[in-house]
Image (cartoon, grey):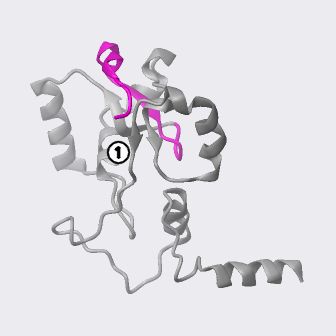
Amino acid sequence: VIQNADELFDHDELSAVADIGWPDCFNSGVFAYKPSEQTYLDILNFALEHGSFEVYNLFICGDQGLLNQPFKGWRDKPPAFRLPFIYNMTSGAIYTYAAAFKKYGAQNHLIKETVEYGEDKIPGVSFDQSSPPTDEERMRAWEVGHPDYLGADAYSNIQKAIDHALE
């Protein structure tokens, strides 16, 4: 937290920032809701029955995949339920953020660190490293700032692909 964000408490349930990779979903990094036992039980029961749609070979971001299902009506709510991106700026240095951060950075309230989870962090979850990641998994890893620098995404492999395309 780099600036006071108390105004989030003035927002109705469920107010959130659109996810940069899938704007029809909200990003669960920052959202406003009214805590209640009923909301808790609804989410818990949904989790036990359905789980999260976000399980990848390389990492899990289960909270977002879980929360977007019971609150799936968020996308169709009025614009007042969509928080500005300044509430969910990512710390990664992705090229599209540079210009926006230069213009809007002073208004930023929260910056989040992208965390990659491994099987040693999540009991009962196995990440099969014997098979290479799918194209979708590699793209998602690039999007969150975790390309495979020593493997398929190594500079030498990228250079080979460029050279081949220019032939």
- What quarter of the picture does the C terminus occupy? bottom right
Please, what secondary structure does the residue beneath circle 1 have? Answer: helix
How would you rate the neighbour count of disc 1 (Cα within 10 Å): few for under 14, some for 14-19, many for 20 or more?
Answer: some
Q: In the image as oriented, which residue stretches furthest toward the top?
A: 10
| Quadrant hosting residue 116 | bottom left
Q: Residue at x 26, y 74 (%)?
A: 126
Q: Residue at x 43, y 84 (%)?
A: 131
Above or below, 161 against 2 in this view is below
Q: In the image as oriented, which residue stretches furthest toward the right?
A: 167
| Quadrant hosting residue 81 | top left
Q: Residue at x 45, y 19 (%)?
A: 77
Residue 153: x %, y % from top left: 59, 76
Residue type (three-letter) at the residue carrying disc 1: Gln
Nearest the viewer among 102 and 13 is: 102
Nearest the viewer among 41 and 92 is: 92
Residue 132: x %, y % from top left: 47, 81
Q: Which residues are magenta?
A: 1-23
Asked if the stretch drawn in magenta spans residue 147, the answer is no
Above or below, 103 against 45 in this view is above
Asked if the stretch drawn in magenta spans residue 17, the answer is yes
Residue 148: x %, y % from top left: 51, 75
Q: Residue at x 66, y 40 (%)?
A: 99
Nearest the viewer among 116 and 1 is: 1
Figure label count = 1
Our reading of the magenta stretch's main secondary structure is loop
Nearest the viewer among 154 and 53 is: 154
Above or below, 152 against 71 in this view is below
- What quarter of the picture does the N terminus occupy? top left
Going by the image, does 68 lie left or right of 33? right
Identify residue for label 1: 64
Residue 59: x %, y % from top left: 36, 64
